[in-house]
Image (cartoon, rainbow, N blue to C red):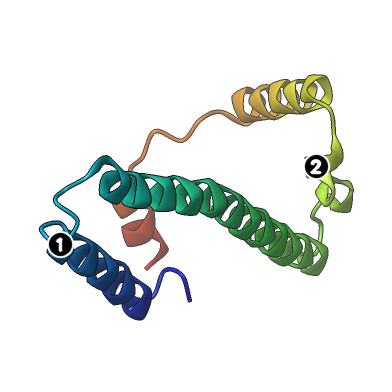
Amino acid sequence: MVGSSWAFILAALIIVVWAATGPLFHYSDTWQLVINTGTTIITFLMVFLIQNTQNRDAKAIHLKLDELIRGVKGARTNLVDLEKLSDEELERLKKQFERVRRAEGEDERSTGELLAQEE
């Protein structure tokens, strides 16, 4: 709702009303303080709203990926909860995948070449 076009229209309307009242309040310090305080409070609250939304999105993506990993035969299902590993454990796993990639040899062909070969 906050990211909707209606929220933008409401915010723009508030700014227009505030600007239109400038002459009425003789562009006083209090008039300026109202918009400064309002925007500061809204910005502060939006930081938490955005963080919450990103956290929910990340959880949903992790669950979807976990389901895909579980559904692929031969996939290492112990990789499902990687987000719970420490930074050191993740680095060790990254190095392990680099060794596997080197052992299998990197494929230098482009994506287009690979797709054409499959057809």
- Residue kind at label 2, given as amino acid type: Leu
**Residue 2 left/right relative to 93:** left
Q: Is the residue 96 above or below the residue 66 in the image?
A: above
At which x and y percent is residue 94? 70, 26
What's the residue at 27%, 50% (across, down)?
31
Total label count? 2
In this view of the protein, can residue 21 be seen by the observer? yes
Q: Which residue is mark 2?
A: 82
Of circles 2 and 1, the one toward us is 1
Q: Residue furthest right?
A: 78
At which x and y percent is residue 82? 80, 42
SS at badge 2: helix
Verify CB contact (< 8 Å) between mark 2 and mark 1: no
**Residue 6 left/right relative to 104:** left
Q: Residue furthest left?
A: 23
What's the residue at 33%, 43% (across, down)?
110
**Residue 85 left/right relative to 118:** right
Q: Which residue is mark 1?
A: 24
